[in-house]
Amino acid sequence: MTFLLAMLGLNSACSQQAFVNADVDAFAQLISEDAVQLIDVRTAKEYAEGHIAGAANVDVKNNDFVAEASAQLCKERPVAVYCRSGRRSAHAANLLATEGFNVTNLSGGILAWEERQMPTTKTEVDVFTTQCGHSVKFYALLHASIRIVIDGKEIQVDPVKELGGRVIDYSAMPKADYIFVTHEHHDHFDERAITQLTNNNTRLITNSRCAEMLGRGEVMSNGDSLDLDSLLKVEAVPAYNTTEGHLQFHPKGRDNGYILNIDGLRIYIAGDTEDIPEMTDLGPIDIAFLPCNQPYTMTTAQLVRAARMVKPHVLFPYHYGDTDVSTLPAQLKADGIDVRIRHYE
């Protein structure tokens, strides 16, 4: 075992250390494996400035670091951690190892990684683990565009290639197993992006209008449900405007929101909607994506009301454009909702 660790560039700092240190080459080899769970333990600001692709962000300086990290990780799978220089992540690695995780720390941190000209990204990712130990990663891409990866299975929601001068390179991503489109507005529906992500095995799920425009796709209407494979089920739910003068943007019955059930993990992707009464009937929701920009979707006050109806464990405001959503975490803290604000490219 000692010989193998040495060959991989791994070492233990002292005989009592409960985790393993790895140099850049060994760390890169380790995180290339699908089973490895990668955690950036720096601050959210540091993470947003650039991080290793696929890393979730849990700040080791948070008082509830162990609980927050443990909620995202599976003990049956290896964990890799890093920080700026390797010091904070060594502390994080020790905390996690004490909890029973198999942890490897990047020696020298992201500074050593970048010195070797290894790639980083600004695309944010959140990682959750299902009841049977499947890893689910959420990537914040662009406005309403979300990439979801389940143990290598690729899901794209409302993929849009370019918006407001920002560009997403879908050619650098794997082809999608499933694409979900909520409605035909240009910030949700982009035929170029859909074509780029599609191969012969891709299943495209849309409302009827998008299927008409594309000439293909499986149509779901509000209230429909599909069992897509052994892990994934989907329900189409209502998404519409209720404010007078805004009804024409998203008329009732036309557009879809989606609830994805991934091995029991229920994810509500609301699409363009206001705080509609149907939200009280969605059932238990683990993760919710709720939009926040009037006149097309919700004000922050509406989003707070919607969150209290849906009661997700984790809430991601999205589609917010220039709307200030920074007050939402404080407004919903007493409700026990973990609000995570992500910076879409």
Image: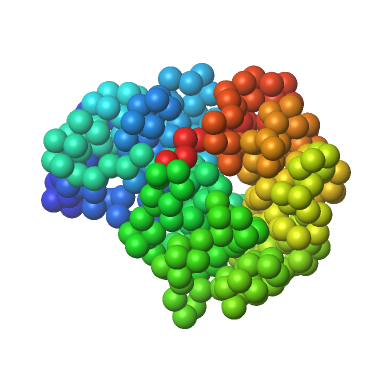
- Residue at 72 percent across and 46 percent down: it is 273
Q: Position of residue 59 (x, y in %)?
A: 43, 26
Question: Which residue is pictured at 48% across the width and 55% down the height?
Answer: 160
Give percent across and percent down for residue 165.
Answer: 40, 44
For image coordinates 58% across by 41% down, the residue present is 319
Q: Is residue 295 left or right of residue 113?
A: right
With respect to residue 65, does 216 lie above or below? below
Tell me residue 108's x, y (percent): 20, 31
Given the current orientation, which residue lies at the most extreme bottom position? Answer: 200
Q: Residue at x 56, y 48 (%)?
A: 144
Examine the rendering and report whether any part of residue 213 can be seen: yes
Residue 17 horizontal/vertical position (percent)? 29, 30
Residue 27 quadrant: top left
Q: Which of the 4 quarters of the picture holds residue 321? A: top right
The quadrant in which the C terminus is found is: top left
Depth check: give the residue in front, 4 or 249: 249
Residue 94 visible, this orientation: no
Q: Is residue 124 above or below residue 175?
A: above
In terms of depth relative to the viewer, which is nearer, 136 or 221?
221
Residue extending furthest front? 245
Q: Is residue 209 left or right of residue 83?
A: right
From this view, report whether residue 210 is shown above or below residue 309: below
- Nearest to the observer: residue 285 or residue 206: 206
Say if 40 sits above or below 75 in the image. Answer: above
